[in-house]
Image (cartoon, helix red, strand yellow):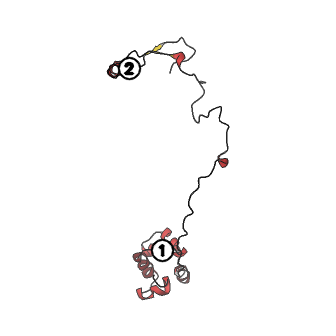
Amino acid sequence: MNNPETAPEAIPAHDEAAQEVAADQGMEGSRTLEVEDFETTDPGDRGGDVASESEPDRPAAAAPKPKTKPKAAAKLKPNNVKKLRIERMMSKAELARRANLSVLTIDRVEKGFGSRMNTKRKILEALGLSLADRVKVFGEEE
């Protein structure tokens, strides 16, 4: 960009095609802009957050919090997966590998979050249990 300390020079406001469009839309008489028409900034200023001088700086913590509806608590249903895994001296990672599931899924199941029937089947088989032991591990289904 031009240095603001140099002599002002004319900058065309529009190119020829834009002037034709402006003429078609009744916007004839476009003027040329001078360098003095633009605000100048410190050459060391690289932009960034621009705050109005009239607006006082306010810490982010003081900003009003939007009101939201409280989320319904997830229905946690306790189970015996963690107890059975520990009895077998198995880590979450080992159980996840044997069940072909993620460690995050094992963690969520152990905490009592809901899971798919197929996930429960994989966990039962990885623990060496039969499908008939499902009630002992996960409790009664609704």
Residue plotted at (50% across, 21% down) = 1
Front residue (pair 77, 134):
77
Which badge, 2 or 1, is on the more N-terminal residue?
2
Which element type, helix, strand or loop, lies under badge 1? Answer: loop
Residue corresponding to mark 1: 114
Rendered location of residue 114, percent (x, y): 48, 74
Could you classify mark 1 by the number of other residues whose Cα lies within 10 Å: few (under 14), some (14-19), or many (20 or more)?
A: some
At label 2, the amino acid type is Met
Residue furthest to the bottom in view is: 132
Rendered location of residue 96, percent (x, y): 47, 73
Report the quarter where the C terminus lies: bottom left
Front residue (pair 56, 9):
56
Could you classify mark 2 by the number of other residues whose Cα lies within 10 Å: few (under 14), some (14-19), or many (20 or more)?
A: few
Residue corresponding to mark 2: 27
Disc 2 + disc 1, Cβ < 8 Å: no
Q: Quadrant of residue 70?
A: bottom right
When the figure is inspected, residue 114 is found, relative to residue 8, above or below; the finding is below
At label 1, the amino acid type is Gly
Residue plotted at (44% across, 78% down) = 120
When the figure is inspected, residue 15 is found, relative to residue 76, above or below; the finding is above
Which element type, helix, strand or loop, lies under badge 2? Answer: loop
Q: Is residue 120 left or right of residue 21?
A: right
Residue furthest to the top in view is: 7
Rendered location of residue 134, percent (x, y): 45, 85
- Cα distance between the residues tagged 2 and 1: 65 Å
Front residue (pair 125, 60):
60
How many tags in the picture? 2
Q: Nearest to the eye among marks 2 and 1: give it.
A: 2
Image mark for residue 52? none
Q: Quadrant of residue 13?
A: top left
When the figure is inspected, residue 27 is found, relative to residue 7, above or below; the finding is below
Residue plotted at (49% across, 12% down) = 9
